[in-house]
Amino acid sequence: MAKEQFSRTKACATKTLYAVMTEMSRRGGSMPAKELYPFVNENVKLTDWEREKAGKMQYIRWTNSFQFYSIDYQKAGFIIKKKGTWYITPEGEKALKKSPEEVMNIANAAYNEWRLLNPKEETPGKEPNDETAEKDNSMNLDLLESDAREGIKSFIVSKSPYEFQDMVAALLRAMKYHTPFVAPKGKDGGVDIIAYLDPLGAQTPRIKVQVKHKPDTAIGAAEVRALSGVLKAGDIALFVTSGTYSADAKHAASSGDKFIRLIDGDEFIEMWQVYYDKMSDEDKNMLPLKRISFLGNNE
């Protein structure tokens, strides 16, 4: 690659990655992968050259450089890519106090150090082109994972509270628990599911489960404390929501003298994916998944 093009490519990645890190910080630490490209297109001043398609793969220049150099930022510990979402780390937050160019230089150095310890086929100093774009489809995978996660979330949102409650019971059965009690419609006395380690419920601990289908709401501390109040000797508690928990709720769960495990909507999806193959066909049909395999790498 010509020196001038190398300089323009790196400069483009420098400003786009810094802008995305800044936006992740503003949002509280993360962004779905599918929102990264629209954000840059709308909020970063890109030149005509950066917006052009180039090479036999016809990649837009700025997206190719953005993805290529994002690996450097991962190696520097500034960002984490996980299940279709990008996260800024505490190290990344500190890096934002530096200039975009300084952050890029630190990231480049981290990648070069990593590459020396993990030799690969690429030639040192190689810049993004069609070959590396074909070789590294991690951004495409990020986008696919993000879309898949949003599809699963939308499916869960469409369910009734009692359907979501049945899904939680199905997950527990996949984890080898017995669920003789799943609350019918009406008042449940603060417990929606009781799970046992054995069919008779003779072994402890017994798990009392509260389920809240509130995908757009953060569960508060009062609801967590209410669950704690129904626990007896030999009981532990599990609180599952399709939404999130407030900071006070998390504190209430961890600071009391009784064990209360909180599972939010994202973790519920992850656990469903992990235990899916252990479910009965009937339970799988509550949230059916289709697995697709992609060629990846170990980065």
Image: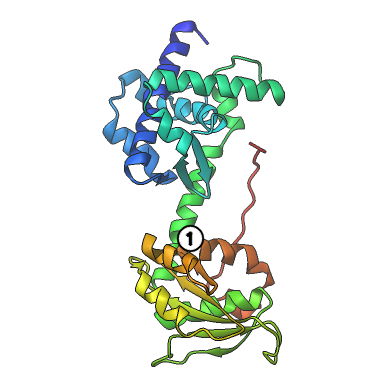
- Name the side, left or right, on which 107 lies relative to 22: right
Q: Residue 114 at x, y = what percent?
A: 64, 25
Q: Is residue 246 visible?
A: no
The foreground one among 285 and 117 is 117
Q: Is residue 143 above or below residue 126?
A: below
Q: Is residue 279 above or below residue 191?
A: above
Q: Residue 79 at x, y = what percent?
A: 49, 37
Q: Residue 88 at x, y = what percent?
A: 44, 39
Q: Residue 296 at x, y = what percent?
A: 64, 41
The foreground one among 43 and 1 is 43
- Name the side, left or right, on which 290 lies relative to 227: right
User: What's the amino acid at mark 1?
Assistant: Asp
The residue that label 1 is drawn on is: 266
How is the protein colored in the picture? rainbow
* Quarter placement of the C terminus: top right
Q: Is residue 103 visible?
A: yes
Q: Residue at x 66, y 38 (%)?
A: 297
Q: Residue at x 54, y 29 (%)?
A: 76
